[in-house]
Image (spheres, rainbow, N blue to C red):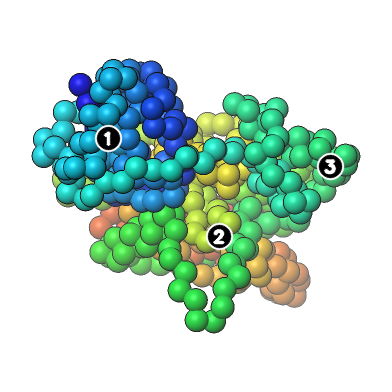
């Protein structure tokens, strides 16, 4: 029997996928549950497994090309003798109008009328940390020549350093910021170049267009951060990040304001039991992703910080699982590290609110005694879905968030 491989739907928003690499060549034997190829979904590279035992007879969509979800990307022959028949089928006719079943995990069988072509030799997959990639690029090292010592064979910075004979660079404490979002690296292009959008950028476009249908409003608030800054200076040596502190503060405040953690459906307002804070992170080459700190209200600040560091590293290496970036219930976006005072963030479909954070800066303020003083303050601006949240809800949430940060930040460490 000859079966069709289909482009799987690896997330609820995925409409097409780009094949990063085939791990099998035409004629290779495949086993049920064995990873056959790597597909770039909206925001991550995912392993795709075969549902069948047999032989990969034909690759109809080669590495580097994109195919719609449900379209045919290859043919699997049950026996070696059927490989020639599968090749003839690929060259002489379009895929059958009624496919037998999806042969890759999460696939959605669909028909396809596009012509097929046999692929060339697949490109090997390289899994490496962002720092390892940077070091390899600086020293002109081909990562394919290295054997990784990290989890699942991942190439780490230490693997690259061992090859170039350098000692690991000393760890330098980062500057105090509210988020790890760094300036994305802009591609080097000529003035007249047209640069196609990446799969990630296309996903962002679709989400932003969808957000235009949401009737939203904005509420701004100024928060004094002196107490939070002092706490951060005390515990940052233990690996605590400012992002984790802010996420924890938001999560604890959401406990008191469940409406801010809800979202709109046509049937009514859907409340959530879990509090999952999604934080925007800029991706190399453009676009952004929102890794999720799940149950941020229940996890201690030290574990939360370690989790966040791991999420960011794997996000920029495109190794997150879908539930690690699409399960957020409330979002946080920060541009403070660029010196931005305030800005408006765009709602994520499926959430009721997103908070934009500006820079924490020394500000001249009037004290209660009527004197002038200097305090560090940051401006936050929350964008809300008005079908779910009203102005008083947002104002009360921001008031309690400010109270926690200004008067009781130690609660974040409990």
SS for dot 2: loop
Res. 341 image quadrant:
bottom right
Q: Nearer the viewer, mark 3 or mark 2?
A: 3
SS for dot 3: helix
Q: Can residue 257 be seen here?
A: no
- For marks 1 and 2, the one nearer the N-term is 1
Please rate how many residues cluster around mark 1, counting C-alpha atoms within 10 Å: few if below 14, some from 14 to 19, many from 20: some
* Label total for image: 3
Q: Residue at x 59, y 26 (%)?
A: 152
- Residue under numbered circle 2: 285
Please rate how many residues cluster around mark 2, counting C-alpha atoms within 10 Å: few if below 14, some from 14 to 19, many from 20: few
Q: Are marks 3 and 2 in contact (CB under 8 Å)?
A: no
Question: Is 317 positioned to the left or the right of 115 in the image?
Answer: right
Q: CA distance from mark 3 to mark 1?
A: 46 Å
Q: Residue at x 66, y 63 (%)?
A: 337
- Residue under numbered circle 1: 87
Q: Can residue 146 be seen here?
A: yes
Decide which of 301, 72 is in the foreground and name it: 72
- Residue under numbered circle 3: 164
The location of residue 3, given as percent across then percent down, is 23, 28
Question: Is 345 positioned to the left or the right of 109 in the image?
Answer: right
SS for dot 1: helix
Q: Residue at x 59, y 37 (%)?
A: 127
Q: CA distance from mark 3 to mark 2?
A: 26 Å
Decide which of 364, 329 is in the foreground and name it: 329
Q: CA distance from mark 1 to mark 2?
A: 38 Å
Res. 164 image quadrant:
top right
Q: Nearer the viewer, mark 1 or mark 2?
A: 1
């Amino acid at each position: 029997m000859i079966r069709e491989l289909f482009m799987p739907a690896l997330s609820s928003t995925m409409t097409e996928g780009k094949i990063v690499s085939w791990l099998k060549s035409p004629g290779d034997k495949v086993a049920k549950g064995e990873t056959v190829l790597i597909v770039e979904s909206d925001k991550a590279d995912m392993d795709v497994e075969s549902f069948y035992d047999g032989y990969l007879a034909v690759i109809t969509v080669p590495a580097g090309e994109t195919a719609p979800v449900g379209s045919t990307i290859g043919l699997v022959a049950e026996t070696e003798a059927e490989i020639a028949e599968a090749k003839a089928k690929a060259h002489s006719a379009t895929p059958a109008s009624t496919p037998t079943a999806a042969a890759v995990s999460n696939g959605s069988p669909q028909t396809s009328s596009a012509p097929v072509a046999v692929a060339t030799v697949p490109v090997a997959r390289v899994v490496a940390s962002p720092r390892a990639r940077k070091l390899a690029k600086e020293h002109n090292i081909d990562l394919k020549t290295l054997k990784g010592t990290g989890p699942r064979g991942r190439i780490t910075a230490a693997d690259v350093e061992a090859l170039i004979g350098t000692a690991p660079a000393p760890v330098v404490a980062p500057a105090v910021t509210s988020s790890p979002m760094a300036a994305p690296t802009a591609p080097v292009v000529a003035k007249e170049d047209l640069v196609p959008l990446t799969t990630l950028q296309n996903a962002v476009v679709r989400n932003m267009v969808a957000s235009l249908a949401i009737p939203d409003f904005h509420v701004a608030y100024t928060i004094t951060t002196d107490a939070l800054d002092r706490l951060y200076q005390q515990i940052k040596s233990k690996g605590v990040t400012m992002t984790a502190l802010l996420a924890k503060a938001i999560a604890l405040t959401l406990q008191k304001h469940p409406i801010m953690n809800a979202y709109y459906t046509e049937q009514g307002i859907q409340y959530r039991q879990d509090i999952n804070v999604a934080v925007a992170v800029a991706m190399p080459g453009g676009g952004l992703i929102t890794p999720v700190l799940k149950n941020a209200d229940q996890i201690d600040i030290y574990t939360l910080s370690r989790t966040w560091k791991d999420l960011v590293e794997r996000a920029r290496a495109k190794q997150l699982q879908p539930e690690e970036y699409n399960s957020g219930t409330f979002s946080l976006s920060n541009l403070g590290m660029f010196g931005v005072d305030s800005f408006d963030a765009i709602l994520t479909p499926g959430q009721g609110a997103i908070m934009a954070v500006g820079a924490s800066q020394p500000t001249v303020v009037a004290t209660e005694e009527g004197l002038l003083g200097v305090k560090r303050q940051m401006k936050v601006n929350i964008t809300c879905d008005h079908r779910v949240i009203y102005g008083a809800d947002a104002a009360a949430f921001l008031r309690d968030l400010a109270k926690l940060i200004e008067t009781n930040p130690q609660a974040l460490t409990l």
